[in-house]
Amino acid sequence: MTASLRQQDACCTPKTIADVTSSWEVTPIGSQIVLRYSDRPQGFHAAIFNASGQKVDELHSDLQASTITWGRGMSPGVYFIMPTDGELSKQKVILIR
C-alpha cells in the first residue's frame, strides 16, 4: 500500500515549472500608460496599434532598463503594445481620460 501511495503521489504531484519572468510590465488602464522594462541589452522597441489594427505610434529606447510613459495626446480607447523583437508578447491597454 505504501508503494502504491508513493506512485500516486508521483503521478499527481504538479511538477515544478521554471518561472518565466517577463522583462516588461505595463499599467493596463489609465490616463497615461506606464511601461517598465529591464534586462533588455538591445533596449526596448514596440509598435502600438489601435483596436482597428492601425499602427498609431512606436516606442524606442536604447537603454537596457527604463520606464516609458505613453498616451499623452492620444484618443481614449483600446490599444495593443507589440514589442518588435518578437521575444515578448503583446499587451492590451486601455487609455482613459
Image: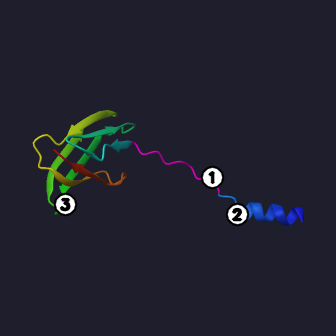
Q: Name the residue rendered at 25%, 36% in the picture.
A: 68
Q: Is residue 56 magenta?
A: no
Looking at the rendering, which quadrant does residue 42 occupy? Answer: top left
Looking at the rendering, which quadrant does residue 11 occupy? Answer: bottom right
Instruction: Establish if 15 lies above or below 60.
Output: below
Mark 2 or mark 1, whichever is nearer to me: 2
Q: Name the residue rendered at 75%, 61% in the picture.
A: 10
Amino acid type for the residue under numbered disc 3: Ala
Provide the secondary structure element on which disc 2 rests.
Answer: helix
Q: For the residues marked 2 and 1, what is the alpha-carbon distance in whole angstroms?
A: 12 Å
Q: Which residue is mark 3?
A: 51
Amino acid type for the residue under numbered disc 1: Thr
Boundaries of the magenta span: 15-23
Provide the secondary structure element on which disc 1 rests.
Answer: loop
Q: Which residue is mark 1?
A: 16
Q: Which residue is mark 2?
A: 12
Q: Earlier in the sequence, mark 1 or mark 3?
A: 1
C-beta proximity under 8 Å, tags 1 and 3: no
Residue 16 showing in the rendered view: yes
Q: Magenta segment, principal secondary structure?
A: loop
